Image: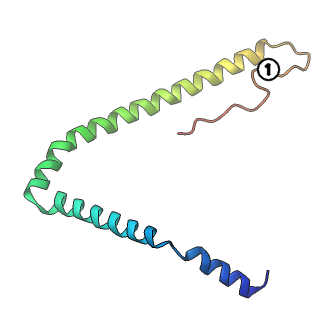
Amino acid sequence: MNATAAVARSEEARVREPWQVAAATVLGAVAGGVAGYLFFTERGRRLRQQIEPGLDELTRELGRLRATLHKAARAAEEGGRLIDDLAPAGGEAGWSGAPPQRAPF
């Protein structure tokens, strides 16, 4: 591919459909309006004060869920190792024949 074709292809990649531009504009305007309401009006401040405790609790619960998932992943890994240890030494693959999967968190 020559340089002219590469430039043309990169310009094509940047062109957006009109509906995408309009959707991004509307989405940005809505997000800005919500942020302005929440941070610059008295009612928005009160609303933030009301929802903040719930968000704090949600954050704590998600942290607990993450810790539980870590424990479950470690237990599954340990169970796999146990099965591998108990498997016959005749060359058969143990638990899965693959290295243990890492937790995504």
Return the residue nearer the eye: 88 or 37: 37
Q: Residue at x 85, y 12 (%)?
A: 88
Please state if 11 lies on the left or on the right of 33 as rendered. Answer: right
> x, y (%) of residue 52?
21, 44
Q: Residue at x 38, y 35 (%)?
A: 62
Q: Is residue 93 placed above or below 57 in the rendered structure?
A: above
Q: How is the image coloured?
A: rainbow
The part of the image, by quadrant, that contains residue 35 is: bottom left
Q: Residue furthest bottom?
A: 4
Amino acid carrying label 1: it is Gly
Local secondary structure at mark 1: loop
Please state if 20 lies on the left or on the right of 61 as rendered. Answer: right
Residue located beneath label 1 in the image: 94
Return the residue nearer the eye: 104 or 33: 33
Please state, as top left, top right, bottom left or bottom right, where the N terminus lies in the image.
Answer: bottom right
Q: Is residue 63 placed above or below 80 in the rendered structure?
A: below
The part of the image, by quadrant, that contains residue 97 is: top right
Q: Residue furthest right?
A: 90
Q: Residue at x 47, y 26 (%)?
A: 68
> x, y (%) of residue 17?
50, 72
Please state if 57 lies on the left or on the right of 16 as rendered. Answer: left
> x, y (%) of residue 74?
58, 26
Neighbour tally class for label 1: few under 14, some 14-19, many 20 plus, Cα within 10 Å:
some
> x, y (%) of residue 56?
27, 40
Q: Is residue 100 placed above or below 23 in the rendered structure?
A: above
